[in-house]
Image (tube, rainbow, N blue to C red):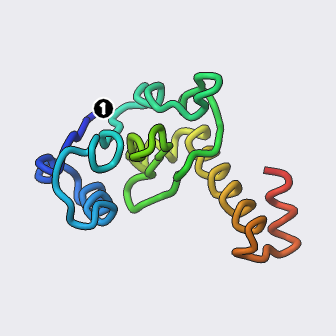
Amino acid sequence: MKVYTSTNDYGTMPATIREHVEKALGGALGVFDDLLGGDVFELEAIVDLEQIVVDYDNGGTAADTVAPMDNAELLGDYAVLFYATNDSGGPCYFVPKWMVDNCIIVQSIIRATTSEHLRMAEENGQVELSATLKSILAHS
């Protein structure tokens, strides 16, 4: 797994990751632990999924546990997985699309996160879900 610790690493990041991080930081420069609450990681092998904790109560990882995260979405050639672990944020993981395509657990984490966000948005009155979508979410 590649680890990026500061904006000084922009030159070695793939464009998709760099653009996402730059946008999130709004032009701020410095150490990611200070700016984001954690480092930025680019996964290189399936075994790297064992380093992503998705269930802090039980210690489950992205290699063996499906649980919603604070953010899990497809972003170009990567999926970004994020779970806030402190007041500043937390580590941000970029999973290559080939890994997402070959790992049902990561696909399920993304679906679980999307479903949870939709449920919360409806509960807060931010969206009104159709009966069909409500039925799908009830079974996810």
Is residue 114 shown above or below 90?
Answer: below
Total marks shown come to 1
Residue 75 point in image, percent of width and height: 42, 60
Q: Amino acid at mark 1?
A: Met
Rendered view: 37 above or below 78: above
Q: Residue 108 vs residue 102: left or right?
A: right
Q: Nearer the viewer, residue 123 or 100?
A: 123
Above or below, 80 relative to 49? below
**Residue sticking out furthest to the front:** 87
The answer to which of 86 and 20 lies nearer the viewer is 86
| Rendering coords of residue 67 (x, y %) | 65, 39
* Residue 108: % across, % down: 64, 45
Q: Residue at x 33, y 61 (%)?
A: 24
Q: Secondary structure at mark 1?
A: loop
Which residue is identified by label 1? 1
User: Which residue is more in the foreground, 17 or 23?
Assistant: 23
Write the residue at 30% across / 32% down: 1
> Does residue 98 sit above or below 27 in this rendering?
above
Relative to 12, 43 lies left or right: right
Specify whether 124 is left or right of 82: right
Residue occupying the far top of the picture:
59
- Could you tell whether 89 is left or right of 135 in the image? left
Residue at 28%, 60% (x, y): give it: 25
Task: Tell me what residue is drawn at x 27 percent, y 44 percent.
Answer: 34
- Classify mark 1: residues with Cα within 10 Å, few (<14), some (14-19) or many (20+): some
